[in-house]
Image (cartoon, rainbow, N blue to C red):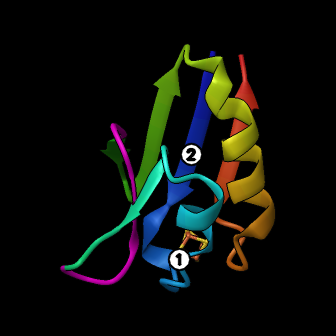
Amino acid sequence: MLVVTYQRKKCIGCNYCVEAAPELFRMSRRDGKAVLLNSSEKKGFFTLKTREMHLVSQAEQAKEVCPAKIIHVKLV
Ligand code: SF4
């Protein structure tokens, strides 16, 4: 299973994650920060768990390009 975690309050709204992983992230028109699609929130951390393993490379790229280093990727 792919687990992506995102600490949204530290997002600076640069859009890089959306370019790297359009199936995982969108920008919010409301506050200009990224949204991790289909995630659930707990204490400011958003988590997506999925068995769609074709998303692993997108998730890894988003993690790499995020200047705030707030995207984390795990395989469990
Ligand atoms: S790459 Fe990081 S800082 Fe930039 S919009 Fe995405 S989550 Fe926010």
Residue of label 1: 15
* Magenta residue check for 37: yes
Question: For the residue carrying disc 2, how many other residues have a C-alpha within 10 Å: few (<14), some (14-19), or many (20+)?
Answer: many
| Disc 2 secondary structure class | strand
Give the image location of residue 75, x and y in percent: 74, 23
Amino acid of disc 1? Asn
Q: Are marks 1 and 2 in contact (CB under 8 Å)?
A: no
Magenta span dominant secondary structure: loop
Mark 1: C-beta under 8 Å from nearest atom of ligand 1: yes
Q: Position of residue 11 (x, y in %)?
A: 51, 77
Query: Which labelled disc corresponds to residue 5?
Result: 2
Quadrant location, the N terminus: top right
Decide: few, some or many residues near mark 1? Use Cα within 10 Å; few <14, some 14-19, many ≥20: some
Number of on-image labels = 2
Q: Nearer the viewer, mark 1 or mark 2?
A: 1
* Residue 14 falls in image quadrant: bottom right
- What secondary structure is marked by label 1? loop
On the rendering, which quadrant does ligand 1 occupy? bottom right
Q: Can you say whether 23 is above or below 69 in the image? A: above
Magenta-highlighted residues: 30-39
Return the residue found at the far left. 30
- Where is residue 40? Give x, y as percent: 33, 39
Which residue is found at the position 39% from the left and 61% from the top?
26
Tell me: residue 4, above or below residue 11. Answer: above
